[in-house]
Amino acid sequence: MHKTSTSVGGDSDSSHSTLTAFFSPSHSYLSIDAHELPEQLPCSGDVTVKLLSTEEGPVPAMVYKILSRGKIIKAGNMNTNTLTFPVLPKMGPEFKLLVYYIKESGEVVSDSRVFKVDKCFPNTVQVSWDQKTVKPGDSASFTVRASPNSVCGISAVDKSTELLGTSNQITLDTVFSKLQQFIINSFESPNQVRSDGDYCRELQLSLVDTLRSGGATVAELTGQSTPEGTPESETSGAAHSSLFIPPPTRSQRFRTDREDAIKPFDEAGFLVLSNLALETRPCYKRVQAKELPELTEDKIQASRVTSTTPAFFTVGYCRGCRWENLT
């Protein structure tokens, strides 16, 4: 995910970019490559985008959807690494392309992109007068040409009235300014990408449920010792019936540093109702720092090797705290 921020004014203008990496437990990624297209597409003709995937072998079966003005304009299936589709006037002033596929494991791999489109109407209207100039009292006629079934409105006023204002005139810009209200922006609700605290909290509870179903005891889950002589069955039952994880305190804040498959759906304006794996990004919990082992070149090299698998244990350090991977 690439974000650019520009600051203008002050002593000097500045611009900086923020890159956020995607995460996939299977190291599967998809990217819509449109760098060869212009920044603003014409409102007619076909365009072709490339689909870059990390999958080896045949191109996976993909699904694509095109959304504009809050409606799905076009959707379909494909199994090629290029997608060609027509750009229509009703796709302006912008449309969003979402492409995704589903792996056998249930993991969703996705990407989306926003395309700007020139402002134009689906039918072209032409008006011509029979004379260039006329005198007061003379008759004049004009001809209107448009596509079949077009609704045409005619208004004739003295040109001097424009000096009083043009707010009541229908122009290309005024029409498309009204269409802006139908565009679903990424910051609008409902936001499917939850905050770090909410997402990581639910992930933690899910992990606890998994451990409980596997027979984990209260002592193992909470780190608290159980009274001597307590049967294991009672301890396990207590873990299932009375285990409560309090909300994280300020010193137990969570964070994530990746994006996952839910982000492209959210930015494209699609609501997702699915039990597939769309949220897979790792979580880090802030805990009190312990005595850190001395880092040698051998240990650093060893940690680089072990961190190539999705389930690696990561610790990041800050002043008086550290971050532990919940997964």
Image (cartoon, grey):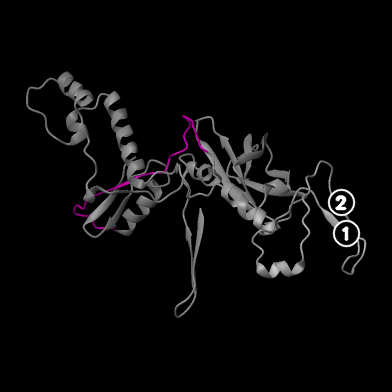
Give percent across and percent down for residue 289: 21, 53
Query: 56 or 262: which is nearer to us?
Result: 262
Q: CA distance from mark 1 to mark 2?
A: 9 Å
Residue at left offset 28%, top offset 56%: 317
Location of the C terminus (image quadrant):
top left
The tag on residue 145 is 2
Side of 240 relative to 118 (left or right): left
Query: In the rendered image of this protein, does residue 241 appear above or below residue 53?
Result: above
Q: Which residue is mark 1?
A: 128
- Residue 298 showing in the rendered view: yes
* SS label for mark 1: strand
Dominant SS of magenta comes to loop
| Residue 126, quarter of picture | bottom right
Which residue type carries mark 2?
A: Arg
Q: Which residues are magenta?
A: 271-295
Query: 313 or 163: which is nearer to us?
Result: 163
Give percent across and percent down for residue 321: 23, 54
Q: Residue furthest front?
A: 137
Q: Residue furthest bottom?
A: 11
Give percent across and percent down for residue 70: 59, 42
Circle 1 residues within 10 Å: few <14, some 14–19, many ≥20: few
Residue at left offset 54%, top offset 33%: 103
Side of 4 relative to 135 (left or right): left
Side of 28 relative to 196 (left or right): right
